[in-house]
Image (spheres, helix red, strand yellow):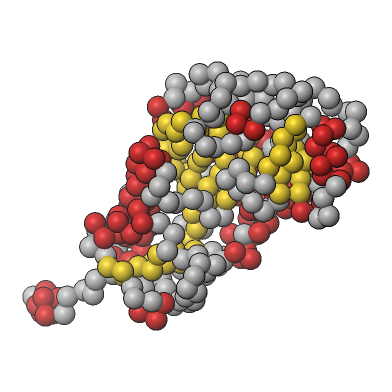
Amino acid sequence: KLQFLYFIVHPRPMPKYLINRSKLLEGVLESEGWESSIDAFDEPDFVMWDANSKPYIPSPESAPLQPLIGKELTKIDNKRQLWMHCQSTMSDMLPVTYLVPDQVSPYSDTTNIWFLKKGHTSGGKDILCGGLGDMLRAWTSMPKYNEWVLQKSVECCLLEGRKWTLRVYVVMTPDKGIWVHKEGLAILHKKLYCDSVVQVDQEVHVDHKGCTRVPFSSLPLYHSVHPSVVKAVQRLFNVYIDILNAAKDPTRYHLFGLDFIVTPAMHPVLIEVNQYPNLSINSGKVGKAIKEELFHDMYDLFIGPAILDTPPCYEGFVKAL
């Protein structure tokens, strides 16, 4: 009885967040009764903060929940580092990749489309595509060629005659569990697919402008592909177990965005890992709905349980590790 009266007189303080990466996540937390912190010194309970933003606000080290810092993630986010770490154990789920022009002959493969990508960018930025000879000439003319990779195109299972990529969200919880969200985003390119290496159209292969976005779960191939995606995530983070071991701080969580190409054999090939996936509210009706669902499921999985001692709910995720 005395304990009950204490909580009436001394109610639990309202939990606070410090976020500058997603208005959608702010809305989810506010719907659960949270309020925004004024700044890093306002003792927030949950942080998702991009330190590169302006004005600069340091991430509070004392926050009970905060993401991994960038220096711990370069080995997985950078395409060059990704290939160097994973080629020996999981080359079957990565595109054929070259790190320097001297590794490949311009006459070794003239029938496929090749992609020249900057190692640390994402979202279709800094990508060229064309025949192998053209890509090699472009690569060797760059003053900092060692910041780029050359990748062979992956045969894609077409949807409505168009190439598409699959965005999957993966969460590392503070106990270092790896969870794959059950929903994902299928991004269909604007133009019908063409594999000609003579005149390669960026809008067919790279450009995301004018793309159609649909929920992954709405595709007939979902139940065949999602379990394979979970296995791919398991293999990836087994390679990067050092990142998990380095994140011994029990306050650390992280949200990753993984991009896949699905082959005609329903095999997911990992083409990119994003340590800071786009969480903007401006992602169309479908993209917004999928992100809101993700944030609600993240809240039920570990945010609410860590801060408010609510029982965890695993319904929105499949555990990979």
Q: Quadrant of residue 63?
A: bottom left
Residue placed most toward the observer, 226 or 115: 115
Residue 147 to residue 267: above or below = below
Q: Quadrant of residue 36?
A: bottom left
Can residue 89 be spotted in the picture?
A: no
Which quarter of the image is occupied by the N terminus?
bottom left
The residue that appears at 71% across and 51% down in the rendered structure is 119
Residue placed most toward the observer, 280 or 300: 280
Total numbered badges shown on the rendered structure: 0
The residue that appears at 54% across and 67% down in the rendered structure is 52
Is 103 displayed left or right of 161 in the figure?
A: right
Q: Percent position (x, y) of residue 110?
A: 83, 25
Q: Percent position (x, y) of residue 294?
A: 38, 47
Q: Percent position (x, y) of residue 51?
A: 52, 69
Residue 298 to residue 39: above or below = above
Can residue 126 be spotted in the picture?
A: yes
Residue placed most toward the observer, 233 or 25: 25
Q: Residue furthest top?
A: 161
The residue that appears at 16% across and 80% down in the rendered structure is 10
Is 147 displayed left or right of 239 in the figure?
A: right
Is 156 displayed left or right of 277 in the figure?
A: right
Q: Percent position (x, y) of residue 208?
A: 54, 37
The residue that appears at 53% across and 55% down in the rendered structure is 276
